Amino acid sequence: MERKKNKQPKLHLKSGDNVLVIAGDEKGNVGKIVSIDMEKSRAIVEGLNKVKRHIKPSAQNPEGGIVEKEAAIHISNLMVINPETGKAARIGRRLNAKGKLERYFKKSKRS
């Protein structure tokens, strides 16, 4: 019998997390995750990695023109910020007392 592969990768990030960019053009900047693309392992961070897109005139935007929007950043370039210390920290997963998986900060051992 062949083993089934988990289709959805496990990520250390969730929407709404405050993150620090640790690599790339936006290195050192902090933002909040708006959305995550699981298949491509990329996240859109609010206010970071802005790109310009040329938009054709349409019913919603009769003028068309150039629009600035956020582009996705690979999740390997993001670290979650610990709200207690305000610094970026590594995250692990463990079972809590109720038997559910929870995320915790590896250094402080707190969830």
Image (spheres, rainbow, N blue to C red):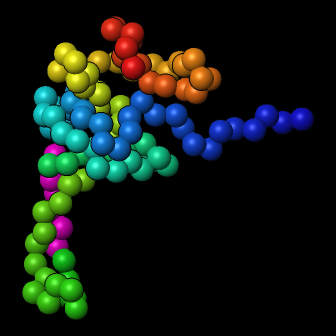
Residue 27's image quarter? top left
Q: Main secondary structure of the magenta part?
A: strand
Q: What residue lies at 10% left-to-right and 72% top-to-bottom?
A: 66
Q: Over which residues does the magenta segment extend? A: 48-54
In the rendered structure, the answer to whether residue 102 lies left or right of residue 36 reads right
Image quadrant occupied by the N terminus: top right
Q: What residue lies at 54% left-to-right and 38% top-to-bottom?
A: 9
Please, which residue is most extreme toward the right here? 1
Answer whether residue 51 is magenta in the image: yes
Q: Does the rendering let one see residue 72? A: no
Above or below, comparing residue 24 to residue 60 in the picture: above
Q: Count of labels shown?
A: 0
Above or below, comparing residue 88 to residue 29 in the picture: above
Residue 40 x %, y %: 44, 47
Q: What residue lies at 69% left-to-right and 38% top-to-bottom?
A: 5
Residue 101's image quarter? top right
| Closest to the observer, 110 or 77 | 110
Residue 108 x %, y %: 33, 8
| Closest to the observer, 24 or 99 | 99
Above or below, comparing residue 40 to residue 58 in the picture: above
Above or below, comparing residue 108 to residue 9 in the picture: above
Q: What residue lies at 42% left-to-right and 30% top-to-bottom?
A: 12
Residue 55 x %, y %: 19, 77
Residue 22's image quarter? top left
Residue 43 x %, y %: 33, 45
Image quadrant occupied by the C terminus: top left
Answer whether residue 74 is magenta in the image: no
